[in-house]
Image (cartoon, coloured by chain):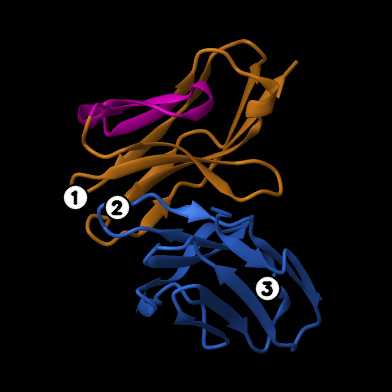
Chain colours: A blue, B orange
Amino acid sequence: DAGVIQSPRHEVTEMGQEVTLRCKPISGHDYLFWYRQTMMRGLELLIYFNNNVPIDDSGMPEDRFSAKMPNASFSTLKIQPSEPRDSAVYFCASSLQLETDTQYFGPGTRLTVL
Amino acid sequence: AQSVTQLDSHVSVSEGTPVLLRCNYSSSYSPSLFWYVQHPNKGLQLLLKYTSAATLVKGINGFEAEFKKSETSFHLTKPSAHMSDAAEYFCVVSESRGNKLVFGAGTILRVKS
């Protein structure tokens, strides 16, 4: 398996622009997670899905952030409008059913908002 | 609520000497505990996992961790450090039934030649 795939790997944008991050989970995994990593706050869970349905979005910082999972093999995290404080590395992870809690992480997207 | 405390933000060892990365957790349930490693500019990789089976867990690359319920600890060890072990290590606890992971702040391991 190719593992969790994220795109783009790097994104540089200007304040106010819309940013869309993409994730393809491991085939057969029913859970998908979006995390944000910064020096100041470490790793934070933003939202997670089970069978394409958002279960817990309490970590989403504000309304400028939204996430969707239209099917089992694709998810997006969108920031509109972006701000410099959104600069971070965004990770996507996926896992199997509740029988196992192991999450498999993608390589991350490094976002820089100027 | 569950939480994780990594007692050292940075650890420096010489190549060939033992590694000890300390982790304490707080949990209301029987937790699942993990150690993940993150090499520079890379994603996180699972090192090992404890899920209420054997208390001594062996992971990849010669790492192991021991679950000690009386001490609420899950320290990560390796007998002999290698230069390639230099990375950031995260101790993680899983909330029961919810499949959410709670991450520690991380410990940066430096290996000196």
Mark 1 crowdedness (10 Å alpha carbons): few <14, some 14-19, many ≥20: few
Name the secondary structure under disc 3: helix
**Which residue does the image show at 27% across and 34% down from the upper left?**
B72
Q: Which subunit holds the residue at mark 3? A: A
Question: Mark 1 is on which residue type?
Answer: Ser
Depth order, front residue of B108/A96 = A96
Residue A53: quadrant of the picture:
bottom left
- Magenta-colored stretch includes residue B95: no
Q: Are marks 2 and 1 in contact (CB under 8 Å)?
A: yes
Q: Position of residue B18 (x, y in %)?
A: 54, 14
The reply, left or right, for residue B67 in relation to residue B64 is left
Q: Residue furthest front?
A: A1
Which residue matches tag 3?
A85
Which residue matches tag 2?
B2
Calculate the distance from the C-alpha at mark 2 to the C-alpha at mark 1.
Answer: 7 Å
Mark 3 crowdedness (10 Å alpha carbons): few <14, some 14-19, many ≥20: few
Question: Mark 2 is on which residue type?
Answer: Gln
Which residue matches tag 1?
B28
Q: Are marks 1 and 3 on the same chain?
A: no
Question: Mark 3 is on which residue type?
Answer: Arg
Depth order, front residue of A71/A43 = A71
Calculate the distance from the C-alpha at mark 1 to the C-alpha at mark 3.
Answer: 34 Å
Q: Which subunit holds the residue at mark 1? A: B
Name the secondary structure under disc 2: loop
Q: Are marks 1 and 3 in contact (CB under 8 Å)?
A: no
Placement of B73 over or under A15, stated as above or below: above
Q: Position of residue B30 (x, y in %)?
A: 19, 44
Point out the tag, 2 or 1, that comes first from the N-terminus.
2
- Magenta-colored stretch includes residue B67: yes
Placement of A24 over or under B4, stated as above or below: below
Magenta stretch in the rendered image: B54-76
